[in-house]
Image (cartoon, rainbow, N blue to C red):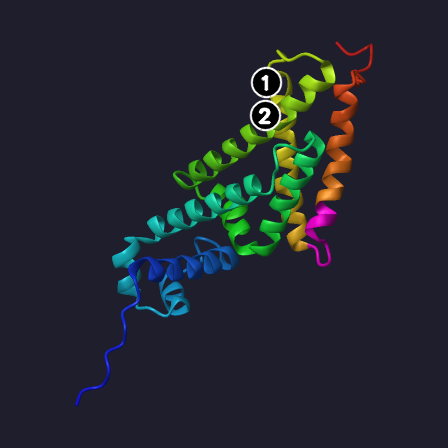
Amino acid sequence: MGGAKTKRMPRAVREQQMLDAAVRIFGQRGYMAASMDEIAELAGVSKPLVYLYLNSKEDLFTACIRREATALTRAVRAGVRTDLPADRQLWDGLLAFFAHTAEHPDAWSVLHLQARTHGEPFAAEVAAMRTEIVAFVTRLVVVAARAAHRDPDLPEHEVAGLAEALVGAAESLAAWANATPGVTARQATVTLMNFAWAGMGNLMRGNRWAPPADEV
């Protein structure tokens, strides 16, 4: 009698295993140094099977970027309750962001370091994610600014730069926090809220910093 047949793993499950392995290798070794042999070995499959499912190293890396970008944006959105005050929404969104990047450091390395430094189309994938997050933060800040100024028609472009700066600061702080032992997601969030929200609060109350009078 022949041995019992091993149940085949569904393609979707197998593909996720490959992506898990690829994110780990790309995140820790970098895109150029990562090899398909390493990824296949970590995933527990043959290299030809990786190519069969994901075509090429470039396509595999793109699939990793898309999956991790979607996971990050979903985590941020899921962390925010829109019925709460703006500062609480920002706190919850930042906390979700820092918690996710801390829990998935290899994924954050792929998004923040690897994808941006290896040209198109990788950088474009991350740029799309970033645009979505900046738009989300812009809408949140606009609501707070309109309430502070008692001006329901305050245009978004008045605060769009604040959202862009805030997202950039969060990205840099996440990279620093992941590389600094003992820094928690909560500590990173407190740091950025004290740095950013306090300043935005003054701005919204009309307490603007002005350049020196002798500046041209």
Q: Kindly identify the amino acid type of the residue bearing the numbered disc 2.
A: Arg
Q: Would residue 54 appear left or right of 179 to someone viewing this image? A: left
Residue 26's place in the image compared with 86, above or below, is: below
* Circle 1 SS class: loop
Residue 175: where, in percent of width, then height? 63, 48
Q: Amino acid at mark 1?
A: Glu
Residue 183 among magenta residues: yes
- Residue at x 44% of width, y 59% of height: 20
Residue appearing at x 63%, y 50% in the figure:
99
Residue with the mark numbered 2: 139
Question: Looking at the image, which residue sits at the far left?
Answer: 1
**Depth check, front residue: 132 or 180:** 132
Q: Position of residue 155 (x, y in %)?
A: 60, 14
Image spot of residue 82 (x, y percent): 61, 33
Residue range (magenta):
180-188
| Disc 2 from disc 1: Cα separation | 8 Å
The quadrant in which the C terminus is found is top right
Mark 2 and 1 residues: CB-CB less than 8 Å, in contact? yes
Q: Quadrant of residue 41?
A: bottom left
Question: Which residue has dot 1 on it?
Answer: 156
Left or right of residue 120, residue 117 in this image: right
Q: Earlier in the sequence, mark 2 or mark 1?
A: 2
